[in-house]
Image (tube, grey):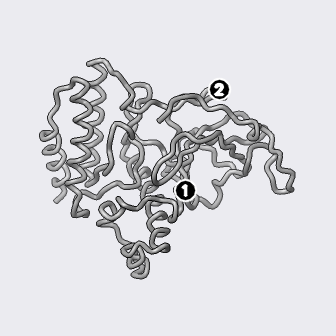
């Protein structure tokens, strides 16, 4: 993830140029809080829930195969306080890549047999169902992980294909700066050991509850103020319920341990896998 600053574009100035009677007095749109699915409570104090709030899009932060992430600001006109969030907008069924979906969707089910058949056959309707599942799965996963005090962004709301969540980085002034990805860091030996310890504790907590990330890599781990933050959770895997669950877990471990070893930390992937498998099976 780039950590260059974002500036409010000309067309997205503080006051709306839309002259329609329903347009907000500032920003680009009224807040979409009303009618959306909300994150877990108690909410962080920075979350703005006022129906009179407005939103402005500051631009694209990251593009991906399943979704694009934008930087979004929300505030209440005439009141102090502005919140910066990440807006993850999932691609529609015809614009997404589905070559990896099958393995991740093992162990997930929908109640309607028509939807299950469509998903299996990858019809246009089935792809739309899968797209909705990705969005709902990530939002639900973030909420559950947040409640377990795991290092993930707080999920603010889900409105159809757009999820708003905590922006991880520096938000002072008009130029938010996103936290750097782990892959871009050159940590000292002491910092490297601390980051690995944070990762191990997070993965053990996940495994205890039967989960693994499913696509974990140094590219979707952020480091903000010496703290790891794990992102990109639409493919979160049920280690026990998914027939390939332990394979996903082992791949997550191998990918991350390989990076730490290349940076000079002597850690063993097999040892961590064994610890995680033991933790995942303690419930059964």
Rendered position, 62 above or below 32: above
Residue toward you, 263 or 76: 263
Task: Give the x, y percent position of residue 208.
Answer: 24, 49
User: Residue at label 1?
Assistant: 158
Dot 2, crowdedness within 10 Å: few (<14), some or many (≥20)? few
In the image: residue 192, left or right of residue 228: left
The secondary element bearing badge 2 is classed as loop
Residue at x-position 29% and y-position 36%: 199
In the image: residue 274, left or right of residue 100: left
Where residue 177 sits, quadrant-wise, is top right
The secondary element bearing badge 1 is classed as strand
Residue at x-position 48% and y-position 64%: 132
Q: CA distance from mark 2 to mark 1?
A: 26 Å
Dot 1, crowdedness within 10 Å: few (<14), some or many (≥20)? many
User: Residue at label 2?
Assistant: 173
Task: Give the x, y percent position of residue 40.
Answer: 48, 51
């Amino acid at each position: 993830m780039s950590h260059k600053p974002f500036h409010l574009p000309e067309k997205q100035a503080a006051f709306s140029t839309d002259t329609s009677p329903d347009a907000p007095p500032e920003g680009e749109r009224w807040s979409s809080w009303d009618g959306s699915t909300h994150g877990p409570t108690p909410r962080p104090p920075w979350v703005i829930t006022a129906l009179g709030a407005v939103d402005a899009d500051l631009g694209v932060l990251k593009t991906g195969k399943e979704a694009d992430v934008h930087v979004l600001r929300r505030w209440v006109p005439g009141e102090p306080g502005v919140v910066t969030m990440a807006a993850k907008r999932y691609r529609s069924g015809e614009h997404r890549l589905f070559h990896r979906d099958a393995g991740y969707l093992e162990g997930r089910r929908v109640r309607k047999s028509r939807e299950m058949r469509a998903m299996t056959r990858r019809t246009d309707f089935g792809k739309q169902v899968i797209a909705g599942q990705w969005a709902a799965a990530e939002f639900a996963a973030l909420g559950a992980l947040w409640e377990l005090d795991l290092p993930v962004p707080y999920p603010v709301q889900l409105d159809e294909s757009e999820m708003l969540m905590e922006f991880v980085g520096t938000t002072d002034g008009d130029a938010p700066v996103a936290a750097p990805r782990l892959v871009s860091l050159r940590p000292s030996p002491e910092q490297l050991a601390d980051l690995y310890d944070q990762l191990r504790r997070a993965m053990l907590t996940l495994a205890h509850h039967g989960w693994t990330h499913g696509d974990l890599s140094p590219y979707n781990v952020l480091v903000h103020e010496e703290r790891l933050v794990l992102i990109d959770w639409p493919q979160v895997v049920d280690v026990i319920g998914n027939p390939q669950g332990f394979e996903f877990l082992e791949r997550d471990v191998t990918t991350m341990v390989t990076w730490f070893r290349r940076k000079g930390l002597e850690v063993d992937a097999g040892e961590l896998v064994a610890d995680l498998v033991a933790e995942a099976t303690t419930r059964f």
